[in-house]
């Protein structure tokens, strides 16, 4: 099972070039799900209502198992697939890449379209910053003040992110820890037998 994946850390917009009079404008976005994809495509059509085509590809899922390539009326396989192949070449997921085309009067033919849409996607992705994201799990603790130092040392040692704290008659802590580290993280608290632990999926 994958505990991490590569995706874009920033969006790239309005990267353009011309090919035989046609203008291609590329966009690349980190996305969460298909609804996010639909919203961004709707925004692109609102931004470019007179575009001849807006071709795109997206890839979702930890293993990139949910994907689609759309030619938007261009010859089959000439637009969406070259864009999708550029996403694959970067080994990224949870990403949408779109290329807006304004027709310039000269037909490019299928080989020309493949080359142009590939270049359009490549230009956008080369500008983007790729980051590794880790799956996390939430873990809650309740402990006494005397155990606070030991608890916080373990939290720091595993690089867990503190989400919530509450200090009243006892101490409560909610942290986010990398999924791949959860078992070792929990095991590190075994000597602190008075610490109450609760996992949240």
Image (cartoon, rainbow, N blue to C red):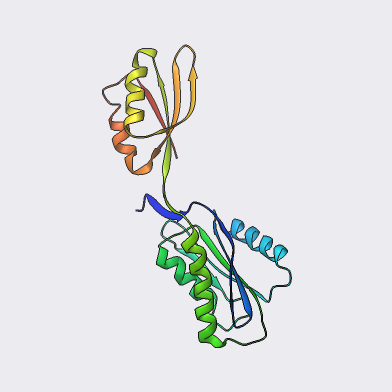
Q: Is residue 95 above or below residue 24?
A: above
- Residue at 43% x, 60% y is 92
The part of the image, by quadrant, that contains residue 15 is: bottom right
Q: Is 2 on the left-hand or right-hand side of 37? A: left
Q: Position of residue 29 (x, y in %)?
A: 55, 58
Q: Position of residue 190 (x, y in %)?
A: 28, 26
- Residue at 30% x, 26% y is 189
Q: Split into 4 quadrants, where in the image is the C terminus?
A: top left
- Residue at 36% x, 29% y is 155
Q: Nearer the viewer, residue 112 or 34?
A: 112
Q: Position of residue 55 (x, y in %)?
A: 59, 72
Tally the numbered discs.
0
- Residue at 32% x, 21% y is 150
Q: Is residue 59 above or below residue 141?
A: below
Q: Position of residue 61 (x, y in %)?
A: 46, 58
Residue 77 visible in image: no
Residue 53 visible in image: yes
Q: Nearer the viewer, residue 115 or 54?
A: 115
The part of the image, by quadrant, that contains residue 49 is: bottom right
């Amino acid at each position: 099972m994958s505990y991490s994946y590569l995706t874009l850390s920033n969006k790239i917009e309005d990267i353009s070039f011309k090919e035989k009079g046609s203008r291609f404008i590329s966009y690349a976005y980190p996305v969460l799900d298909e609804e996010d994809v639909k919203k961004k495509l709707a925004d692109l059509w609102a931004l470019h209502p007179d575009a001849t085509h807006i071709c795109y590809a997206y890839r979702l899922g930890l293993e990139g198992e949910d994907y689609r390539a759309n030619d938007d009326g261009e010859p089959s396989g000439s637009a969406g697939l070259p864009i999708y192949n550029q996403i694959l070449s970067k080994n990224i997921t949870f990403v949408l890449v779109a290329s807006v085309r304004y027709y310039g009067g000269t037909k490019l033919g299928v080989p020309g379209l493949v080359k142009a849409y590939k270049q359009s996607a490549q230009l956008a992705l080369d500008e983007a910053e790729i980051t590794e994201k880790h799956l996390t799990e939430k873990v809650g603790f309740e402990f006494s003040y005397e155990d606070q130092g030991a608890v916080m040392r373990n939290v720091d040692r595993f690089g867990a992110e503190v989400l919530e704290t509450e200090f009243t008659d006892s101490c409560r802590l909610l942290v986010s820890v990398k999924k791949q580290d959860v078992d070792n993280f929990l095991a590190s608290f075994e000597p602190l037998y008075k610490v109450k632990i609760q996992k949240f999926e």
